[in-house]
Image (tube, helix red, strand yellow):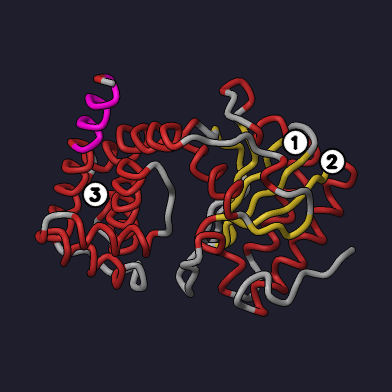
Amino acid sequence: MENLSENITPSPEINALLQELLKDVRGILGSHFVGMYLEGSLANGDFDQDSDIDFVVVVDDEVSESLFSSLYAMHERFNLMDTQWSTNLEGSYISQRALRHHDSRHANHPNMERGFGERLKMVYHDETWIIHRYILRERGITITGPAPKTLIDPISPNELRQAMLSTLHGWATQILNNPNEITHRGYQSLTVLSLCRILYTLQFGDIVSKAKAATWAKEILDEKWKKLIDEAWIGRHNPQLLASADDVNQTLGLIRYALERGEEFKMSSSAH
């Protein structure tokens, strides 16, 4: 098996972890293995010590129950490794057919989230997963396999905007209805930075890193949001701390603002 490039990520420890993951995944999937890729912050260029390692494994068909069981056991072992990065693996196992374009009939795929004690599970990858597909297609890092652009159909700016609108009306509205979800700095900060990215995409029809979206938002949005965004970037480094009541309320206000901008976009789109 080929060795990973020493420069596949900025961290030799992460590279060693990915080398072992690749070896085990190929050993389990055998001839069903097509390729393994990195997306998320590693692909977008804003990876740091608090980022997760977003990976995508492409398989030739849907993952069978027996293969899922083997992958489950493998990820269970990885999650218990003595390295901070083993609990920051976050990724999916996607068939070639499902990766090419969204199909609601073939959207349940094995998925692993970051966090100690997390386990591989079958997750419905709805139309908002187009955001991951876009990052992978345009900026994805190939560990091994065909170039991502050969596996994924082109994605238009309006498709990205629609995905962000769906995210707003699903994920963001859920937080608005249950503010207890953002009482800790980790998720509260993630929410603020994700809203910056959503607003950027609604404006430009493109996906950028959280860092770039936050910088843009501070320059463009009302001055009242600047402190919230600055504190969110700091807060993501202290995820277990409690968010202040003011930050929670400001975050809910930013959600409402983003929802208003989403409605304005929908009205302007229908007018053309």
Q: Nearer the viewer, residue 85 or 131?
A: 131
Label 3 SS: helix
Say which element carries label 2. helix
Q: Which residues are magenta?
A: 261-270
Query: Can you tell which quarter of the image residue 250 is in?
Result: bottom left
- Up/down of 196 relative to 156, above or below: below
The quarter of the picture where the N terminus appears is bottom right
Vertical order, 52 against 194 (above or below): below
Residue 109: give x, y in percent of width and height.
64, 36
User: For the image shown, how many numbered marks are present on the structure?
Assistant: 3
Q: Residue furthest front?
A: 272
> In the image, which is nearer the foreground, mark 3 or mark 2?
2
Q: Which residue is mark 2?
A: 32
126 and 261: which one is in front?
261
Q: Mark 3 — residue? A: 180
Q: Is residue 271 left or right of residue 81?
A: left
Cα separation, mark 1 vs mark 3, equals: 36 Å
Q: Earlier in the sequence, mark 3 or mark 2?
A: 2
| Residues at circles 2 and 1 in contact by the CB criterion of under 8 Å | yes
Which numbered marker is on residue 63?
1
- Cα–Cα span, label 2 and label 1: 9 Å
Cα–Cα span, label 3 and label 2: 42 Å
Sequence-earlier tag: 1 or 3: 1
Amino acid type at mark 2: His
Q: Amino acid at mark 3?
A: Asn
